[in-house]
Amino acid sequence: MACAHAAGQGENSPVNPLTAFAARKERSMRNRTVRLRVSEAELSALKSLAVARGLSLSDLLRRAGLGTRMPVRRFDQTDAAMLVRILGELGRIGGNLNQLSRRANAGKLLGHDADLAATLVGIDALRGRVREIVA
């Protein structure tokens, strides 16, 4: 932003907001081109990744090159349906493990209760992560 006292004016001199905006816009204008050689397979992979992230190819490459945070991957209906099925399977596995844990706690499966409890905690964590992804 323009600094009033840097131009020899007093500290309390007003700065023209239109001039400041024009200066900022000029600094950030993208008027340079970078050429990059890639194979057909690499180009296809880059384009797919850009579409999945909801970015243009230029934005994807700019963000990757500058280390700027990428948006979370978008899921299409096929991906979302698969994650919902995975979540259901994890629920069924968790139910089976819960039944085994109850038996172990009742003394019917001696020596396995700690392993079953740890596995059940892991399954619950996976289910939570899949719910976060789907949401």
Image (cartoon, grey):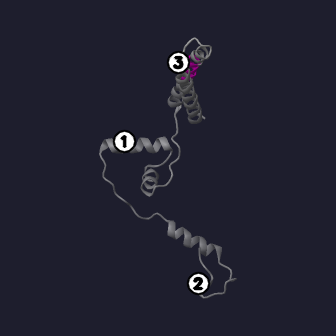
Residue 77 versus residue 36 in the image, above or below: above
Q: Amino acid at mark 2?
A: Ala
Q: Which residue is mark 1?
A: 44
What residue is drawn where x is 67% and y is 84%? 11
Q: Secondary structure at mark 3?
A: loop
Q: Position of residue 7 (x, y in %)?
A: 58, 85
Q: Which mark is residue 65?
A: none
What residue is drawn where x is 57% and y is 15%? 100
**3 or 1: mark nearer the eye:** 3
The span picked out in magenta is 88-97
Tally of marks = 3
Q: Amino acid at mark 1?
A: Ser
Q: Which mark is residue 111?
A: 3
Q: Position of residue 77 (x, y in %)?
A: 53, 30
Q: Position of residue 107 (x, y in %)?
A: 59, 13
**2 or 3: mark nearer the eye:** 3
Name the one closer to the observer, 109 or 34: 109
Q: Secondary structure at mark 1?
A: helix
Q: Which residue is mark 2?
A: 6
